[in-house]
């Protein structure tokens, strides 16, 4: 900017030391373009932050699964804890899955009695 000013004012023998800009008006189209660019940058940052959160969550879940896989009782305790959390709500229905290995002797016993 200084060199541009010097080129324009040197032939007149004037030296510009300071320029002060007091009022800048941008065209509406440029304002819209700048707003769109800022919004795109915010969305990009939000996506990066969300992806980092997902990555941390997946690592935490992997670590938890590694710990739980070391002990079958830990899995059962976690399952019961989850049921307890679900049942804290007053109007909830809990479906309690049972392995067929447990139910099958009872089912066989009823068919033989008939």
Image: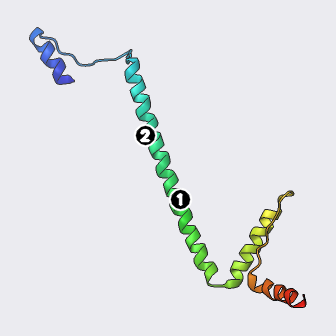
Q: Residue furthest right?
A: 113
Residue 66 lies left or right of residue 13; in this view the side is right
What SS does tag 1 mark?
A: helix
Task: Judge from the rendering whether residue 45 lies leftward or rightward of residue 11; answer left or right.
Answer: right
Placement of the C terminus among the 4 image quadrants: bottom right
**Residue closest to the eye, 31 or 83:** 83
Q: Residue 98: percent from the left, percent from the top?
A: 77, 78
Say which residue appears at 22% left-offset and 24% top-offset: 1
Q: Residue at x 69, y 80 (%)?
A: 74
Q: Secondary structure at mark 2?
A: helix
Give me the residue at 37% from left, 23% from top: 30
Residue 78 pos. (x, y %): 72, 74
**Disc with the residue nearer the chain's start (2 vs 1):** 2
Q: Is residue 10 left or right of residue 50?
A: left
Please rate how many residues cluster around mark 2, counting C-alpha atoms within 10 Å: few if below 14, some from 14 to 19, many from 20.
few
Label 2: which residue? 41
The residue carrying pointer 1 sits among few (fewer than 14), some (14 to 19) or many (20 or more) residues within 10 Å by Cα, namely few
């Amino acid at each position: 900017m200084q060199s541009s000013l010097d080129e324009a004012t040197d032939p007149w023998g004037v030296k510009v030391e300071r320029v002060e800009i007091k009022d800048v008006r941008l065209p509406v189209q440029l304002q819209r373009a700048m707003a769109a660019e800022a919004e795109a940058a915010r969305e990009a940052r939000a996506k990066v932050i969300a992806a980092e959160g997902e990555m941390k969550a997946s690592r935490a879940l992997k670590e938890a699964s590694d710990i739980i896989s070391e002990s079958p009782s830990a899995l059962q305790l976690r399952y019961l804890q989850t049921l307890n959390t679900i049942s804290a709500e007053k109007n909830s229905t809990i479906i309690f899955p049972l392995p067929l290995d447990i139910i099958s002797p009872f089912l066989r016993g009823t068919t033989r009695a008939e």
